[in-house]
Image (cartoon, grey):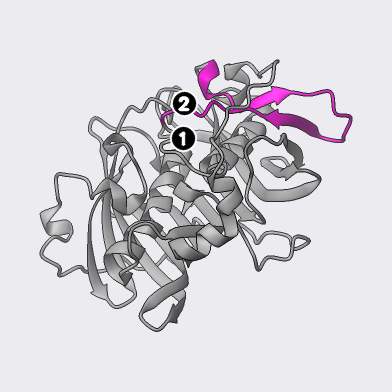
Amino acid sequence: MIARGFMITTLDPTEQPAAPPSTDRSAATPSMSCVCPDGPGERLTSTVPRELVHRAAVAEVFLTGMCRPAPDRFHITAQLPRGHSFFTPIAGTHYDPMMICETIRQVGSYVAHEAYGVPLGHQFLLWGLDYTTVPEHLVIADTPADLDLDVTCSEIRMRGTQLQALRYAVVMRQNGVVIATGDVGYTVTSPAVYRRLRAEQMGRRPMPSLPSAPLVPAQVGRHSLFDVVLAATTQATTGATWQLRYDTRHPVLFDHPGDHLPGMVLLEAARQAAVALTPAPAVLPVSVVSTYQRYAEFGIPLWIHAERTGPATVRVTGTQSGEEVFLAVVGTGQVQSMPFGMMTA
C-alpha cells in the first residue's frame, strides 16, 4: 500500500473524515483462538519476507507470521524493536505510534500476497488509513513488544480470481491487552494498468526537495534535521502552512525508489505539523484519520496546512498545484516522563 504511495478515486473531497476508531477495549473484536501450527502458541522468531510487505530493508519488516482461522480473518504476529533509527521512543519511554501505523500498513500487502494470491509487482493504491492507540499501553518494557494482530477483511472485491480491492480492520494486542486499532482500505492494480496510468512519471528519476529554513527537529518531535519534513514558508493563511521537504536518500521514508512520494512521507508531515502546533514537550500522535485524493508528485512544491480544531486535535491538509492531495486529522497526547503516564496535550 504505502510502499507505492496513496491515491483515492472514490472519495468526495468535500467529505469530512469519520471519527477515529474507538479505543474502548469492550468494543474491539474478541481475541481469536488460533489453531494454526504457526499461531501464537508457536511464535516465529524471524520476520516475514520483506517483499510481501513492500520493504527493501529487512530491518524495516515488523511482521513475523500469520495464520488463517477463517476465510477472511487472520491472526498476524509482529514485533516492535525498542529502538529505531527513525521511529525513536517518545520521551525515551513510549513507542512512537507511527511505528504502530507502519505495522498496520504492512498487514495489507502481506495479507493480499500471502492469502489472496496477489502477485508481486502489483500496485496497492490506498484510499484511507486510520489508527488509534491506547497511549498508556505504549510504554516500552525490558524486551521488544511481541504483538498479536486480529485482522478482519471486508468489502472484498474480486474480478474472477484476482483481488481488486478490500478493507481490513486490525485489533492489536500485547499480552492480551489492546494497544491499538486500525482501519485501512485500498485497491490493487496490475503492472500493465499501472504503466498506462503512470508511464510519464515512471520515466523520471525521483529528486529531493530541500527548501531552506527547515523547522528545528525539536519543534516536530524528531532528533535529526535529516528527519524533518517541514520547511518554513511566508504564505499568508490562517493556521500554519509549511512546504514539504524531503531527502530521497532517507532510508525509512524512502525505503525503495518509486514514481511518486510515499504515503508515509505524507503521514509523517501530518504528524510533524500536529506536533509543531502543540506547545508541549513529548507529544504523541495518538490517532490519525486520513484520506487520500491523488498522487503526490516529485518536483512540484507540496504545501502542508494545519489548524487546531480542538484541545487535542489538529486538521492537516496537503495541496499540490492548488489541488488537495490528502487530509489527516491527528489526535495528540503528551507523555509524562516520570512517572509513566499520559495527559492531554
Q: Mark 2: which amino acid?
A: Arg
* Label number found at residue 249: 2
Residue farthest to the right, as pictured: 236
Q: Mark 1: which amino acid?
A: Phe
Position above or below: 161 against 314? below
Viewer can see residue 86: yes
- In the picture provided, is 285 more to the left or to the right than 57? right
- In the picture provided, is 252 more to the left or to the right than 127? left
Give the image location of residue 186, x and y in percent: 51, 63
Position above or below: 280 against 77? above
- Structural crowding at the residue carrying mark 1, measured as other residues with C-alpha within 10 Å and reported as few (<14), some (14–19) or many (≥20): some
Which sits in the foreground, 316 or 212?
Answer: 212
What residue span does the magenta drawing correspond to?
A: 225-251
Which sits in the foreground, 342 or 257?
Answer: 257
Q: Are marks 1 and 2 in contact (CB under 8 Å)?
A: yes
Q: Quadrant of residue 137?
A: top left
Q: Is 233 within the magenta? A: yes
Viewer can see residue 21: no
Tell me the element at label 1.
Answer: loop
Q: Quadrant of residue 122?
A: bottom left
Give the image location of residue 22, x and y in percent: 53, 59
Which residue, given by chain and number where applicable, does mark 1 sit on?
254
